[in-house]
Image (cartoon, rainbow, N blue to C red):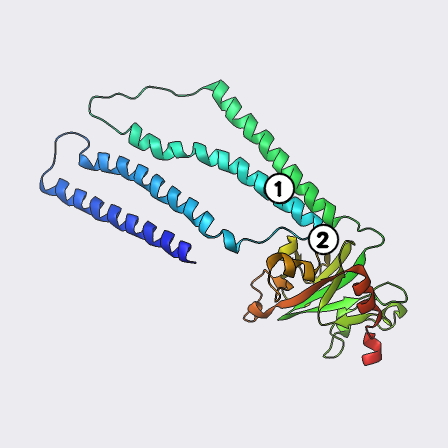
Amino acid sequence: MLSLVLVVAVVLIIAILVMIFRIGSLVSSVKSPVQGRVGTSNKVNGFLWMAFLVVMGSLAVWSYFASRDGFLPEASSIHGKETDYLFWVTMAVTGIVFVTHILLFYFPYKYQYKEGNKARFFPDNTKLEIIWTVIPAIVLTMLVFSGWKAWRDITRQAPDDAVVVEVLGKQFNWLVRYPGKNDKQLGQYNYKMIDATNEFGLDLTDEASFDDFNALQIHIPKGKPVLFKIRARDVLHSFSIFHMRVKMDAVPGMPTKFWCVPTKTTDEMRADLNNPDFNYEVACQEVCGRGHFGMRIILVVDEEEEFNKWYAKQPTWLSQH
C-alpha cells in the first residue's frame, strides 16, 4: 500500500511540475516572443522524458522488492504450478519487449529538435517490418497455445476417480453439495424447486439425490483429482481459489466446471508459511452486489484417509429435512 501511495505521489508531483513549467513557457512566449521555432522548453521536455524514465523505473523496481512479502506462496495444485510457469514466461517475454520501450523515452532526449539539423528521410524498411511482424506473431501464438492447453487440461473430462463437489453461488454466500456415499452420483436439480429449505433445488423425484449432503466447508483430498461443478442462482459470481491458481465464473443458467489436483494439505501450508491460522478459502472475484465482500468459504485440504473419514460421517440432506 505504501509503495502505491508513493508512486502516485511522485507521478502527481511530476505532472504538476510539467504543468507549471508549460504554463510559464506559454506566458513567457506571449510576453517576449523568441526568434526560431523552439526555445528552452524543448530541452526541458527532453530532460523530463529521461527523468521520468529513471524515477518511475526505479520506483517500479523498488515496488517489486518491497511487495515480495505479500506475494502468494508456491502454488498448491498441479495446475497452479503450470499457471505460475506460464505467468513468468509471459513476464519474461513482455519484459524483453518493455526494455525496447526505453527507447521511446531516450529518443525524445537524444533526437530533440535543434536549429539547423535536418531529419533523415526514412519512410520504410520492408525487411525490418517483416521481422518485427513475424517474430511477435510466432511468440504470441506460442503463448496463446500454451495458455489454451493449460485451460483445456482443467476443463476437459475429469478422471473417473475424481471427487465431485458442486458449488452454488448466490447473494451472498457459497452453498456446497457432495454426492452420497452409496452411489457417488449427484442428484438432479430443478430451479423451480428452490425454496428456503431446498436451497439447491434438489429434485427429490431422482433417487440419486436421496443420499446427497451439504457442507459448511469444502473438504477435498490431497493428491486426488477434484471436480468442481459450479453454478449460480442469481447473478454472475466467480469461484476462485487463489493458492491453487484456479478460477471459474459461476454463470446463471450455464453450469461450468473445472478439475484440479491439490498438492498440499492445509496443515502442510500452515507449516510452510509458519502460520497456524492459515486457511485456504474460496472467494468471489465478481462484484456481485453490496455483500460481495462476504462471499467466502473455507476450503480444507485433507490427507486422503482423513477426507474419507470426514466424508463417511456426513448426514444426508434428506435425513435433516
| Quadrant in which the N terminus appears | bottom left
Residue count near mark 2 (Cα–Cα under 10 Å), binned few <14, some 14–19, many ≥20: many
Q: Is residue 302 visible?
A: yes
Q: Look at the picture and state if 235 lies above or below 227.
A: below
Residue farthest toward the bottom in the current orientation of the protein: 321
Q: Earlier in the sequence, mark 2 or mark 1?
A: 1
Residue 200 lies in quadrant: bottom right
Residue sitting at 15 percent across and 29 percent down? Answer: 36
Callout 2 touching callout 1 (CB < 8 Å): no
Question: What label does residue 86 carry, if any?
Answer: 1
- x%, y% of residue 33? 11, 37
Residue count near mark 1 (Cα–Cα under 10 Å), binned few <14, some 14–19, many ≥20: some
Nearest the viewer among 255 and 153 is 153
Q: Look at the picture and state if 88 lies above or below 229.
A: above
- x%, y% of residue 26? 17, 43
Q: Look at the picture and state if 40 lies above or below 27.
A: above
Drawn side of residue 87 relative to residue 109, left or right: right
SS at mark 1 in the image: helix
Drawn side of residue 104 relative to residue 87, left or right: left
Residue sitting at 32 percent across and 19 percent down? Answer: 120
SS at mark 2 in the image: loop
> What is the three-letter code of the residue carrying label 1?
Leu
Residue under label 2, please give it: 263
- x%, y% of residue 144? 63, 38
Q: Is residue 321 visible?
A: no
Residue 99 lies in quadrant: top left
| Quadrant in which the C terminus appears | bottom right
Residue farthest toward the left in the current orientation of the protein: 32
- x%, y% of residue 247? 65, 55
